[in-house]
Amino acid sequence: MKKALAILSVLTLVGAAAAADRPVEGKKWEFSTAFGFESYSYEGSMGAATILNFPVRLGYYLWKGLEFEPELKFTSYHYSGGGSESGALFSLNLAYNFKLKSPGLIPFVLGGYGFGDGYAHLLMFVEPLPDGVSATAYDFGGGIKYLFGNIAALRLEYRYTHWMSEKLGASNDYDIHNILVGISLFF
């Protein structure tokens, strides 16, 4: 019993020490969402497209600023010819949040890998997307969170995503650069 109590005490102290180094003290979870807007213009049958992105993330701080941040990004495409489609991408991201001496600012970097049908139709520049076509993607990015107290933050980030489709072939890889603005809630 004494051994178990000693082990629990040490784990509690280690956990408290690790929590003190997190970007938001005492918080292990982060829920965040954002909004991204993209517009494309190109030659071909579709002419132009507007793409809206809406990611939803639930992050868990593994150690200090290291965060496991799975993300489900919903996308909605609207073409100049009047058509529209929607898609989704599920990504497993790792982020590192830096704790600065300047209160309220948390810069971060992230990287991850995912799969889904978001943007897959752009890999071919053909409408509509053939049945069963899906894509994989990896992404990298960074940004900054501006804290409001210790419960919420404004989140601004840049994201680079590289899409690949096995069914469409390697020549249909596609690169996306996106700016996302959103909020984070810590608990």
Image (tube, rainbow, N blue to C red):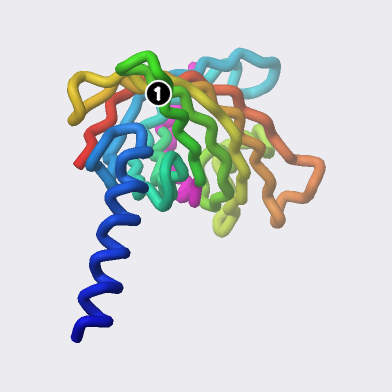
Q: Residue furthest bottom?
A: 1
Find residue 21 and report its horizontal and vertical position in percent: 37, 38
The quarter of the picture where the N terminus appears is: bottom left
Q: Quadrant of residue 119?
A: top right
Identify the residue at horizontal 40%, vertical 23% (top origin): 106
Q: Is residue 61 placed above or below 186 in the rendered structure?
A: below
Q: Nearer the viewer, residue 149 or 92?
A: 149
Three-letter code, disc 1 = Ile
Find residue 114 and report its horizontal and vertical position in percent: 54, 50
The quarter of the picture where the C terminus appears is: top left
Q: Is residue 36 visible?
A: no
Q: Nearer the viewer, residue 167 or 159?
A: 159
Find residue 144 and report its horizontal and vertical position in percent: 43, 20
Magenta span contains residue 24? no
- Decide if residue 164 is on the left or right side of residue 11: right
Per the rendered image, the range of residues in magenta is 76-93
Find residue 183 and report its horizontal and vertical position in percent: 28, 26
Q: Quadrant of residue 48?
A: top right
Q: Is residue 28 placed above or below 78 in the rendered structure?
A: below
- Decide if residue 84 is on the left or right side of residue 176: left
Q: Label 1: state its secondary structure.
A: strand
Q: Residue furthest right?
A: 171
Magenta span contains residue 82? yes
Identify the residue at horizontal 21%, vertical 75% (top origin): 5
Q: Give the residue number, with chain letter if any, for mark 1.
A: 106
Q: Residue furthest front?
A: 2
- Decide if residue 43 is on the left or right side of residue 57: right
